[in-house]
Image (tube, grey):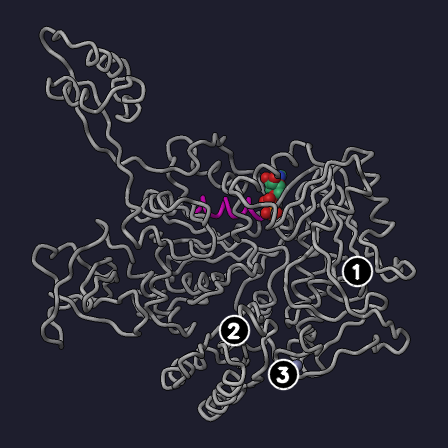
Amino acid sequence: MIARVSLEIALRKEFDYLIPADLAGQIDVGSRVQVPFGPRKLLGVVTAVAEESGHANLKPILKVIGAQTLVTPKVLKLARWIGEYYCCAPEIALKSVLPEAVRKEDAGWRERLLVRALPFVGEFPKLPGRQQAVWNLVEERRVIMLSELLRLAKTTANTVRKLEDRGLVSLTAEVSERDPYARETILATQPITLNPAQAAALEKIKAAMNQGDEVSGRKAEKGAAAGSATFLLHGVTGSGKTEIYLQAIAHALARGQGAIVLVPEIALTPQTVERFKARFSSGKLPTLVAVLHSHLSAGERHDEWHKIRQGRARIVIGARSAIFAPVEPLGLIIVDEEHEQTYKQEEAPRYHARDVAIMRGQMENAVVVLGSATPSLESFYNCRRGKFMLLELPERVDDQKLPRTRVVDMRSAMRDGKGPPLFSPQLKEAITQRLERGEQTILFLNRRGYSTSLLCPQCGYVANCPNCSVSLTYHRIDQRLACHICGHNEKVPLVCPEPKCKNPAIRFAGTGTQKVEEVLAKLFPRARIKRMDADTMKRKDDYRHVLGDFRAGKIDILVGTQMIAKGLHFPNVTLVGIIYADSALHQPDFRAGERTFQLLTQVAGRAGRGDVEGEVFVQAFTPFHPAIQYARRHDFVGFYEQEIEFREQLKYPPVSRVALLTLKGRNEEKIRFTADHLKRELEKNLLALKDLVVSGPAPAPLLRAENFYRYQIMLRTRAMSSLSRELARIIKSLALPEDVSLAVDIDPVNLS
Ligand code: ADP
Ligand code: ZN
């Protein structure tokens, strides 16, 4: 017998190996194996098993890793799709479906030695003092870990071995499972009675799951593809989406199926995990919920993953890569906060976990539920076109009102001769009130993004590209403004171009959370203030401690970046202040408006989750921008309608799809030359794609990073699958200079 193996090096090629007699029966499709490759030993995955090979002189497989096959045929199929659609080497796609701790064997199971007292008959022997002391401990405990015993008895393993020789104790190695949540006490919860909107949504999801049976039955008969169901659950913040997820999962379990729940990494707080464990994982079924995310140790990840593979864990909750968890049979996939950018992996394979979830749902006939208070334009567009089914929860549970949002025009808060203040008088006043009433405040500043746009702090003017409707990127070095989609380039104006303004102080200097904290401490010397951003949250537990203190009322004002925008639920927060709402708006990206709308809505959702109605202050230099105005009114559909029009006009997603090609190298001339050549090749080879738009090459917004220059070409078409296929072919035949690299990003979410 021979096995075809995909090795972990991106050769876009598979190799045949002999299955040696002693490994026969242990190797199947999906097995992880170690094989010789030239002088090296490499790891790989078996993708097929056959009687014989077309090649002669095959080398034998050296060893198998793990007792079970690690990549199930279904996950293998998904990996192949990722390789094709995202235009990356199949080996890279295959590698990404197993966590590192599972792929490499070193993490393994943790074994520990247990000492057990054996039943004793006859006269008990007279033991030397030290052995007697050890025996006393073992007898009292019946079973004790060797390491603990040695610590308590202050002795060495030798003494224990002597007791073993006398037949008094046994020493055995047992697997001890690492449970990252072992120290938590989790109280069981029961399903809540749903309100009518929730109940209606759940019924539709359940009906689709039940229908799955018929469909797969028919599919088996006819060999036809199923039309599986994808739902978009659009529910305002606090509308009880999570309760629907929980009850839909219970339905999957009752049908003998498992579920995968994806949440953005940042939302994978103990609070979130606890809600799922509390419903399903307490009492007799401690392993029913497995958790996969980057804060686990390699050993914990190994154990959690194998609990899933062995079928003991039926529910998986995790970040992006949990979409590959080997849950079988899979009945339900939930993607919470489906609009989140972090679902996109920013290195190869550059997959989008939401889109992979939909594909996996189709392949395995599982129902997919995408949930969000601010759906992505892609998902809502798919509802409008009848591809997804829309479920709506327009109200918060318990009749809580959505917070009242006020937009503060920062242009009118300008002080003579100085820049704009950080805090408008209105926001200052509102904070003072909260401090007096003993209520809490969250202040939000989006400081992300290195690319600077040009903004006039006096009139709100922003320099935009005349062709692409994205803001121009300010390049400090040569004092120019550039569009990174079409390459348009112009000089930085000396004064604001707005005829009524002509402000000479047009260059905007950004501020960060640290500055906000400093100014705040001066304005409110007695307030207890805490900052939460990537700089202050370095250690694993920092996030938890600060949130714990905030919950306990030990902090009055929490200042932070998007780290505090999502999923938090603090009933005593009655005020949310957004320091500079425009900052996300002026990113050089066609999704800037969408992101601003999402961010403002999400942050505002943190206010008024208790008995007191919440209030939100949005400080902005462009207060009448639609993204800000629709967010103020909590009007997603209104925002969608006007935004989709702009996307239609410029053929941006979701109306078409984008592939972004980035060339990178140290020599700018060479990069530009190669990019021009690539563009010509593309245009020559892609004539069959009638709707294709090729823009660029243009310098990336982050033109120079770590001494590398980056140029981009953007392709837009509706027929992305065909484009991916063609791109793979063109790239293969392309002879790039050695010091120039090319990255392909299909459906990019980050255009920098
Ligand atoms: P979302 O996920 O939409 O933000 P959650 O599911 O977190 O909303 O619900 C917010 C709060 O309301 C939670 O504490 C939840 O337990 C509670 N809740 C959900 N559904 C109901 C209901 N039908 N009746 C009462 N409380 C509910
Ligand atoms: Zn442009």
The answer to whether mark 3 is within 8 Å of ligand 2 is yes
Residue 482, compared with residue 409, is above or below; it is: below
Helix, strand or loop: magenta stretch = helix
* Element under disc 3: loop
Q: Residue 44: which numbered mark, if any?
A: none
Instruction: Using residue 740 as the reference point, say whether residue 431 is left or right of it.
Output: right
Q: Are marks 3 and 2 in contact (CB under 8 Å)?
A: no
- Give the distance between the C-alpha atoms of the residues marked 3 and 2, in whole angstroms: 18 Å
Q: Which residues are magenta?
A: 240-251
Q: Residue 708: which numbered mark, if any?
A: 2
Residue 598, compared with residue 641, is above or below; it is: above
Q: Does residue 249 belong to the magenta stretch?
A: yes
Q: Residue 620: which numbered mark, if any?
A: 1
- Give the distance between the C-alpha atoms of the residues marked 1 and 3, in whole angstroms: 29 Å
Viewer-closest of 518 and 211: 518
Which mark is nearer the camera, 2 or 1?
A: 2
Viewer-closest of 623 and 414: 414
| Residue name at image x 71 percent, y 45 percent | 442
Residue 285 on image: x %, y %? 38, 35
